[in-house]
């Protein structure tokens, strides 16, 4: 019985020493039931690939591809399309959600998020930075850094222009998959491993790191840091910032709820519940002292912003007469009143 | 008598169903007088194209191009250059400034702005979002989203790197036209339909949406939202923000006058007249309460910033001792004094 | 005796009138001693190139390359690699650090910084803007602006997509050199002439102008303006800003010391010493009035921020209750106490 966490056929870039440095999977699949898994394992076995019991990946030679292409397995069509490829065909078998153990596994897990097959935080990505080689992403594909100077010389001499678009461990998402129903005005700012909900528009100033993203409709003109998830209907204004956990933001994973608005050039170092607004230009860090105001505009008490993290129906602003950061109920009916009057 | 609003020959990308999904016009013309219009109409008629009375566009086959190329019309040279093209030659005839009715018309109207033949807000662009298909803008040109996975697989298999630079309804301006006298350090951030005045430098952090731009010399390191127009001599500092009308900024179209300075990371949700300064890091929204100060630094009165919208010679800053947003006259001689003392 | 400031063989792009408009040097060398210089001068003389006494550059024809390739000089290997090149081989000889006098010289000096052979401010770059032509940087290489429309038409007609990535005097650094030990998530935002220290990561929102950069390990998600240098261990948060001297920032060259943190969306118009923090969202300009606080949080005195420029161990924040910009000692032991109590 071979249920699987995930499986994919892919085309990989191979480095100077023959190892896989990058991989792309046109049709990854997840949560494969035992019956479907058995079919895949059998087809691979017939092609000479032993799936074993541990997560694994392997290169497929022409004979293996031919065997898979002739199988009655769901992956036959993909195998056929890969025959004769100038990039290296591979197979990745993930029996379980262990931390990624190879470049091929890491790329598959990132792609699962961007294909919306797994949500941010739903997978074990421990150690993924160490898995991923830092590559020069050129107009001719990924190139190992130490191989780049020779490639640049060769391209110049042959009259081509070898453009280096990024030097990074993570490539842009859209060179791997463009999920349904999105616009991404500048794809260089959305990393593979981002989860972009249907209905989301990422404008030029928007940014989405890996293992982060929007769950539904959103207008994103701000920065969604690693690990940050934004709920349905929330907008991030131009140049707005969400603190991530990789650097600077501590170890609290920030979430933004539904129907929130982060104003232009605003920022949060705390989580937001639903229907919250942070005024344009205001940065609310966890340590910001906030004057909680009741519906009459009277001070209830002063709190650190971190005490308000994740609460709904809050409006944060800086009083433009006194300079004090204030928080009041965004809509009169809702949860904040409880927060305002708790401990009164 | 055939005066025309605009006319152009173009080369178009055709989608899977044969329809035009994108078009480029090397030499669009506008405000064509009756005599010149008659020559064009006649040349097109001879080529088998009926210009009719309504705005229209049509594909040109080899015979039509040959006919146009042989005419004594101003478009003969362009027609000759298009003979044998691998992209689809088309003609667009706009008798009037009705809202765009097709992809070809929408692209022409956007290009008219970027060629500086029409200013922002000077044309009817109603419904242009609905006209424009969302496309994957790849290193091999625009591709329909549902055709992208097959193209990605094909490119990988053939050893090419198909880069998706954006997924958007609007392409970058400079793939269509680079107007005279500009520098644009990062073209991905200037949409087709932007109007970039001669003498303008758009730095890497600058951004210009469609139907927006600079009228003359400017240094732009901030974001010019849809509809926003910036006057001669004004600078937008790094990361500065102007609120647009498409999302978040209400329905007031913001203009920035001449010789203004938006400081780095500053922002405005109101219009500025001439010779205004907004201090670095300050966001002035329409609802910001502003303390108007006279030349002696005394409070005249407190107003909402929207009351100051469009006025000249204002300096906005946040008092770094009191936190209050203040406004005083930027230069002693000018209009603000009147504003300061009105209603005294 | 021919000691030299710098020497390089390169491959150049030649414009419509035959002049060099851009150049790339695979292995530039600096501070060449007299003995090594004599070998180069001799090899060039044998190849028909007169190095003279003034800084100079010249095109190398096939015969000259053949001669150099056969020499026992260190540049023989590079010369061999350039034989048959479709771009123009050139040699640049800089006897001294005079201001750049040609395109070839300007590109060499910029590359010297990006190769980490010279630090920012270490070279004479006077007049470099005037040296550098404004070019359209396309997917097929640099193109003169007035030649672009014809190239666009040709590319469209032939079915290629000629992408214009920037229109600028400075190209992106990584199309010339990727120094060791860096990640640059979005290379369009790092200009040739940037100095990126080993261990630095430039995230998507980071930016580095020419003659500026990081000296060691840094996480850069903000903007390093022209001339700004950031010390070992300092982090620039997302969207943070450093004022440059080219526009807006006056004539004080800003430096950020070691182990500093500029918070997200923060900014500085003053220099920072070591171990300084500027709170997220706070912009400290030279004219900002700052309340200096002692370790008990009591006001010592109020100063203009420019008086604190370059001092170490400062923490800048805006008091979120009073709106006042405050400065206190970042770590209790250090220099700020002296600053706080000076003039008491």
Image (cartoon, coloured by chain):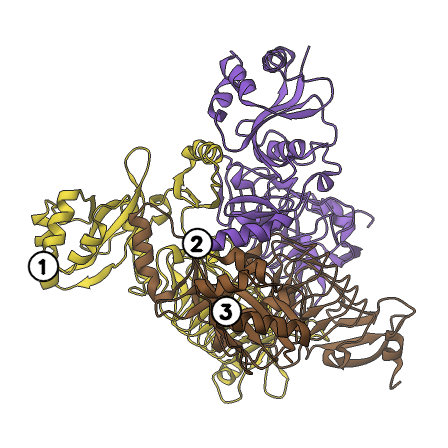
Chain colours: A brown, B purple, C yellow
User: Foreground mark, 1 or 2?
Assistant: 2
Residue A337 percent across, percent down from the top left:
89, 75
Q: Is mark 1 on a helix, strand or loop?
A: loop
The image shows residue B132 at horizontal and vertical percentages of: 68, 40
Marks 2 and 3, how far apart in space? 24 Å
Compared to residue A72, the image places residue B250 above or below, namely above
Query: Does mark 1 fall on the same chain as mark 3?
Result: no
Q: In which quarter of the image is residue C228?
A: bottom left
Residue beneath disc 1: C72
* Residue at 51% over, 21% down: B79
- Indicate the quadrant containing the N terminus of chain A: top left, top right, bottom left or bottom right: bottom right
User: Where is mark 2, residue-wise?
Assistant: B159
Query: Considering depth in this image, is C158 or B272 the residue closer to the camera?
Result: C158
Query: Which tag is nearer the camera, tag 3 or tag 1?
Result: 3
Depth check: give the residue in front, A46 or C48. Answer: A46
What subunit carries mark 2?
B
The reply to whether callout 2 and callout 3 are in contact (CB within 8 Å) is no
Residue A64 in the image: state x and y as whole percent: 48, 66
* Disc 1 packing (10 Å; few <14; some 14–19; many ≥20): few
From the image, tell me which residue sits under label 3.
A47
């Amino acid at each position: 019985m071979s249920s699987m966490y995930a499986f994919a056929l892919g085309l990989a870039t191979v480095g100077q020493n023959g190892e896989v440095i990058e991989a792309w999977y046109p049709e990854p699949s997840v949560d494969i039931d035992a019956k479907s898994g058995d079919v895949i394992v059998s087809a691979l076995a017939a092609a000479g690939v032993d799936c074993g019991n541990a997560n694994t990946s392997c290169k497929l030679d022409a004979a293996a591809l031919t065997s898979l292409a002739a199988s009655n397995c769901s992956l036959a069509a993909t195998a056929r399309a890969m025959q004769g490829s100038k990039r290296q065909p591979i197979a990745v078998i993930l029996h379980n959600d262990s931390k990624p153990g190879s470049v091929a596994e890491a790329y598959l897990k990132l792609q699962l998020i961007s294909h919306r097959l797994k949500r941010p935080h739903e997978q074990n990505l421990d150690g993924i930075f160490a898995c991923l080689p830092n590559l020069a992403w050129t107009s001719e594909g990924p190139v190992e850094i130490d191989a780049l100077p020779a490639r640049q010389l060769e391209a110049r001499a042959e009259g081509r222009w070898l453009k280096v678009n990024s030097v990074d461990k993570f490539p842009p998402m859209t060179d791997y998959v463009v999920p349904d129903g999105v616009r991404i005005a500048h794809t260089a700012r959305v990393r593979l491993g981002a989860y972009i909900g249907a209905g989301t528009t990422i404008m030029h100033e928007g940014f989405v790191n890996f293992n982060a993203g929007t769950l539904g409709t959103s207008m994103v003109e701000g920065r969604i840091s690693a690990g940050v998830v934004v709920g349905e209907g929330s907008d991030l204004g131009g140049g707005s910032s969400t603190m991530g956990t990789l650097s600077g933001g501590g170890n609290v994973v920030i979430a933004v709820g539904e129907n929130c608005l982060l104003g232009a050039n605003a920022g949060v170092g705390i989580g937001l519940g639903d229907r919250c607004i942070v005024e344009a230009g205001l940065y609310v860090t966890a340590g910001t002292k906030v004057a909680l105001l009741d519906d009459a505009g009277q001070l209830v008490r002063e709190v650190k912003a971190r005490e308000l993290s994740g609460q709904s129906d809050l409006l944060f602003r800086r009083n433009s007469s006194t300079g004090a950061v204030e928080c009041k109920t965004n809509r009169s009916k809702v949860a904040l009143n409880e927060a305002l009057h708790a401990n009164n």
